[in-house]
Image (cartoon, helix red, strand yellow):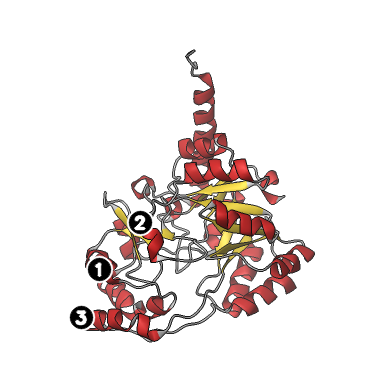
Amino acid sequence: MIIDDLNVPIVLAPMAGGPSTPELTVAVAAAGGFGLLAAGYLSATDTAARITATRAATDAPFGVNLFVPGPATPAAEFADYLAELAREHTLGDAAYDTDDWAAKLDLLVADPVAVVSFTFGCPSAEAIARLRAVGTESWVTVTSAAEARIAVERGADVLIAQGAEAGGHRATFVDRPEDDATDPLSVLALLQILTAASDRPVVATGGISTGAGIAAALAAGAAAAQLGTVFLRCPEAGTNAVHRAALSADTPTMLTRAFTGRQARGLRNQFMVEHSANAPVAYPEIHYATAPLRAEARAAGNPDNVNLWAGQTHTLAPELPAGELVRTLAADTKAALKAALSRRIQAC
C-alpha cells in the first residue's frame, strides 16, 4: 500500500476549483507526504495535462481525485431558487454534466497513477477492478459507517473518513435535506467507528491543521491524515486572492447549499446567510448557475458573494511554502506523540 511507504503521514487534500495545482502536489511529495491532484471541474484533457506537469517535476507517486456523478435534478425543483437569485445577481446556465467521468476514468486506466480517490459516492466494483488491474489503489471518501460498508463491498483499498469539520463539499454519497437535522459525525468519532468496523486503512480528514491534530488522528487509528485548508495560503496553491485574504480572519464557518446545491463548509458571509435556508439540493446545476456571480465577486474583491471554502480550523493556516509546512507538521506530530506518551495516566 502506498500509505505504508510514506515518510510523513500527511496526504494533501484534492481541493478542486483552483487551489489544487501540480506545484502544490509536487512540493508536498518532495517533503515526504502524498499529494492528490484535484480533477473535479476539469476535462479529461486538462486532467491529463496536470498529470503530465506533475510527472515532469517529480518521480514521487501521487494520486488524482474524481467526483462520482449523481443524477440530474428536475428544473422545477430549483426554479424558484434561481428566480430569487436572479433578482439581484447575474446567473449562468443551470447545467448538468457528469464532470467528464467516463473519459477521466478511461484516462486513468490508460495512463495509471498510484491512487485514484473518489468523492460524492463510490464507483462501481467494475471501475475499481479496472483501476486495480493497472496497479492503482482506490481510496473512497466516506462520511458514515453505511457509506464505508458500500465502499468495502465494492473493493475500496482505503477509506478516507471525512468529518464534519472539513472545509469544502461534504463527501456524502447522497445529499439529503432530511439528514440536516442529524448531527454529522466529527472526524474523531467517524475514525473510531470505521477502524472498529473495517480492516481497511483509514485516512482521517476534517479540521486537522496542526501536528497535534495529526497525532490525535494517528493515535485513534488513522494510517495518515489528509489536510486541505492548512495548505490554502501556501504560495504553490492556486487559491484566489479574495479567498486567501479571508482565511486569516476569525470568521465562523457554516454548512450551506447556497453556492452549489450541495452541502459544503465555508466562511460565513452575506450570500450564505441570505440564501442558505432556501437553497435546494441540485448539484451541479446550482454550481454552474452561480458561477458568474462568484466570478464577478472575485474580480471585484468582494468576499460576500464568493464561496470561501474552509475547515473549522482555518485560522491556523500559515503563509508558508508547502514543503516547509509539511516538515513543520511532521516535526510537531512527533513532538505531540512524544508528549502524549510521556504524560502519566493516573490510576482510577
Residue highlighted by disc 2 = 181
Disc 2 versus disc 1: distance between alpha carbons? 22 Å
- Place of residue 179 in the rendered image (x, y in percent of width and height, measured from the top left): 41, 60
Disc 3 versus disc 1: distance between alpha carbons? 11 Å
- Place of residue 115 in the rendered image (x, y in percent of width and height, measured from the top left): 66, 60
Q: Does 49 appear above or below 131?
A: below
Q: In the image, 67: left or right of 235?
A: right
At 25% from the left edge and 73% from the top edge, which residue is drawn?
300
Q: In the image, 309: left or right of 114?
A: left
The residue lying toward the viewer, choosing from 308 and 236, is 308
- Place of residue 295 in the rendered image (x, y in percent of width and height, measured from the top left): 33, 76
Q: Amino acid at mark 3?
A: Glu
Residue highlighted by disc 3 = 88
Residue highlighted by disc 1 = 271
In the rendered image, the residue lying farthest to the right is 133
> Which quarter of the picture shows residue 62?
bottom right
At 67% from the left edge and 48% from the top edge, which residue is drawn?
200
What is the crowding at mark 2: few (fewer than 14 residues within 10 Å), some, or many (at least 20)?
few
Under tag 1, what secondary structure? Answer: helix
Under tag 3, what secondary structure? Answer: loop
Disc sitting over residue 319 in the figure: none
* Sequence-first disc among 2 and 1: 2
The residue lying toward the viewer, choosing from 180 and 285, is 180
At 58% from the left edge and 63% from the top edge, which residue is drawn?
118
Q: Does 347 appear above or below 48?
A: above
